Image: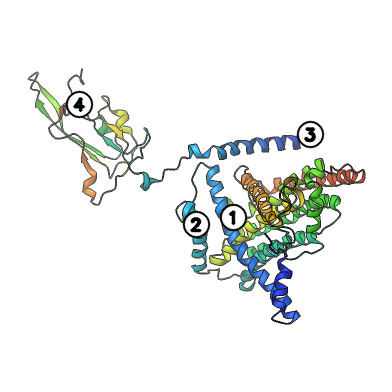
Amino acid sequence: MSYFGDIYKGIKTLLTGMSVTGKVFLNNRSNSITQQYPDNRETLKMFDRFRGEVVMPHNDKNEHSCTGCQKCEIACPNGTIEIIWDRQIDPETGKKKKMIDQHIYHLGMCTMCGLCIEACPTDAILWAQNYENSVYDRSALTKVLNQPGSKLMPGVED
Amino acid sequence: MNITLSITTTIYEFLLEYMSEGAANIGAMITIALIYLAIFAVAGLYLVLLERKIAAWFQLRLGPNRVGPWGLLQTMADALKLVSKELTGTVKADKFLYNLAPYFVIVSSLMALAVFPFTKEFQAFDINIGIFFLIAISSIGVIGILLGGWASNNKFALIGAMRSGVQTISYELSVGLSLITMVLITGSLQLSEIVEIQKNGWLIVQGHIPAIIAFMIYMIAGTAETNRAPFDMVEAESELGAGFHTEYSGMKFAYFFLAEFINMFIIAAIATTVFFGGWLSPFGITESIPWLGVFWFMGKTLLIVFLMMWFRWTFPRLRVDQLLTLEWKYLLPLNLLNIVLMAIIVWLNLTIQL
């Protein structure tokens, strides 16, 4: 009879549901996901995919891998990235070459869409995992990503 | 330890030394009422805290932990905040009924507390129709909800109140019938006597199969009667704002809130008294120390309260038609069958007596 069958199935599914939540309740201590932020400021580390701000990593010889191709500037939907560049003579080959002067990033305008990082052919820019981005002055949000005096890492363009 | 547990007579005799018989009687009643009010207002607040903590643990959170150690003072702070808030209302509300409604709800839930035997003789009012009194009193609360919803002059409040009417009136049948199933074994409606009978084994053991069915039906219907999830269509936040108490603020809102939690405690306390032996300890291990019964009673009650909170954080909310299908097509016929089964078992002396 489906009447009693329904009751049996109903009770069975209810008990299944309760066992699932009961297990979560009992195992809560070890995997509570709450971060008590201001208290654990020193130890709190954001997960890898967190989008804090765009940074340009430099190696210890103050070299980055941005070729100045401007693909990120084109990909950016709201003009957050501005690249100031000019053609300079490469001291090694003696030829004229496009080089970046300043890679300007307006954090105040950035929507964290990540299109620039996807567009970058040389992985010159990446997401940083910092999260305390508030400042007292708006102009502090305009950042120059390449460090002064930095130059292109050799071998990136090959 | 020699503690006098029959509080009513103790206070009455104490007052009798100072005043006349009638005045002492009234004085004893008022004193006990005030003690109960104070204790259960605080207990209600801590039930709110318990609910929030348990909700957090079910959802992999931490819960309130800032106010006081482990957040123990959180709900106290909330209550203080609610007391200090302005009592607002709608312009076109029916002022008299609007103000009356919260008191109906809170008074009816506090009245029910009077008859519970917390331990041997520790009972404010040992009425000989205890179960009947409880069923009758717990139905009065719905009047407050209906009045509040109607008098607020707000469509959400009205819809919530009407749903509450549908729900409570339907599920009262199941609560009453499942308790009557157990009364068949005890042969008495007096709560202290029901507990005495359970010295030969708790009723859920004595009545075995039909008692377990009755307990399941009672828990479902009891959860529905307190308007808690998964039967919380009365105040379904995602549909109705806050349901019948949408227009209430400050202390009047707190009364509704407190009444909900005290009602939950009452439903659990009835289940403890009728199914799990009230203040009796398992196998009579602490029978010689009667005041320990309070802890056994509270422990069992809190376990059942935890069960209801477990329901709340597991099951999705029912639709109105599903709610009524569950009651009228499943619980009620099963309950009637169960009564017949229990009657046969009692008639043939098939109950288990330890």
- Pointer 1 or 2: first along the chain: 1
Q: Residues within 10 Å of mark 1 (few under 14, many from 20)?
A: many
Q: Amino acid type of disc 2?
A: Gln
Above or below, comparing residue B195 to residue B349 in the picture: below
Circle on res. B74: 2
Between B345 and B298, the residue placed more toward the observer is B298
Q: How is the protein colored in the picture? A: rainbow
Left or right, B337 with reference to B161: right
Please identify the quadrant where the N terminus of chain A is shown: top right
| Cα gap from disc 4 to disc 1, whole angstroms | 64 Å
- Residue at point 68%, 51% (across, down): B296
Real-space Cα separation, disc 1 to disc 3, in angstroms: 40 Å
Query: Is B137 left or right of B65, judged from the image as shown?
Result: right
Q: Which mark is residue A2?
A: 3
- Of the pair B274 and B123, the residue shown nearer to us: B123
| Chain where mark 4 sits | A
Residue B33 or residue B100, whichever sits in front:
B33
